[in-house]
């Protein structure tokens, strides 16, 4: 099995195998929350499964969460881990919910080489669900844009 490291923004690292999609990682038990493929399919819609377990991308402008700016916290749909505080959310005008920082230890990253350039992919650190990508064109104080798929998130108002 091919091995790579999954970098968690808090500075710790998790190692897991990359033998295809998240289904194999979750079944391999690399994350604190794991489910079988059948369990993931039963709890997620087709669109949610495509994004969260197969690293797909939802259509720009399709998520109602893009326009939510109420106080609260955005959680992982797959395991309910708190990922992003509403204070870090901003309007990137990209059509996807965007944040300049995640909560400490909430996400992990890995290189995504599926397109012509290498991008930074972000995932939930507890269940491995794909969230989106991180770019270097965000606002202060981090200069980062965490461009996320709304189907991966659940907003919980304060």
Image: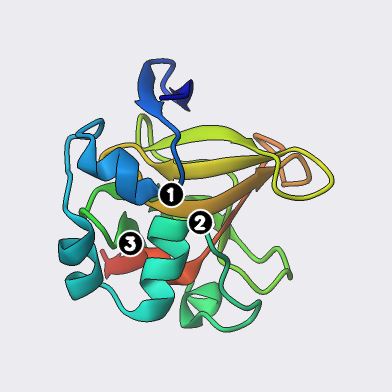
Q: Which residue is mark 3?
A: 72
Above or below — where is 67 with respect to 29?
below
Residue 112 in the image, given as x and y percentages of width and height:
64, 41
Q: Which residue is mark 1?
A: 21
Above or below — where is 127 with respect to 131?
above
Image quadrant holding the C terminus, namely bottom left
Q: Residue at x 35, y 21 (%)?
A: 14
Q: Nearer the viewer, residue 4 or 59?
A: 4
Sequence-first tag of 3 and 2: 2
Rendered image: mark on residue 111: none
10 Å neighbourhood of mark 3: few (<14), some, or many (≥20)?
some
Q: Is residue 70 among what the camera can see?
A: no
Image quadrant holding the N terminus, namely top left
Between circles 2 and 1, the one closer to the viewer is: 1
Residue extending farthest to the top is 12
Residue 132 in the image, given as x and y percentages of width and height:
55, 54
Residue extending farthest to the right is 116
Do the residues bearing badges 3 and 2 touch, measured as CB atoms within 8 Å? no
Q: Which residue is mark 2?
A: 55
Q: Is residue 129 among what the camera can see?
A: yes
Residue 29 in the image, given as x and y percentages of width and height:
19, 34
Between circles 3 and 2, the one closer to the viewer is: 2
10 Å neighbourhood of mark 1: few (<14), some, or many (≥20)?
few
Q: CA distance from mark 3 to mark 2?
A: 26 Å
Count the labels in the image: 3
Sequence-first tag of 1 and 3: 1
Do the residues bearing badges 2 and 1 touch, measured as CB atoms within 8 Å? yes
Relative horizontal placement of residue 109, taking residue 30 as reference (left or right): right
Sequence-first tag of 2 and 1: 1
> In which quadrant of the rendered view does residue 39 lie?
bottom left
Relative horizontal placement of residue 93, taking residue 14 as reference (left or right): right
């Amino acid at each position: 099995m091919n091995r790579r490291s999954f970098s968690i923004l808090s500075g710790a690292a998790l190692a897991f195998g990359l033998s295809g999609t998240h289904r194999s990682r979750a079944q391999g038990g690399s994350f604190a929350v794991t489910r079988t493929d059948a369990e993931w399919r039963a709890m997620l819609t087709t669109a949610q499964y495509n994004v969260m377990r197969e690293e797909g991308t939802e259509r720009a402008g399709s998520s109602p969460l893009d326009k939510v700016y109420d106080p609260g916290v955005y959680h992982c749909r797959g395991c309910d881990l708190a990922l992003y505080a509403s204070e870090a959310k901003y309007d990137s005008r990209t059509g996807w919910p965007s944040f300049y920082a995640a909560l400490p230890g909430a996400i992990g990253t890995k290189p995504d080489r599926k397109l012509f350039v290498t991008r930074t992919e972000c995932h939930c650190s507890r269940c491995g669900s794909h969230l989106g990508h991180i770019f270097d064109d965000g606002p202060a104080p981090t200069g980062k844009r965490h461009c996320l798929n709304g189907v991966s998130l659940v907003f919980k108002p304060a």
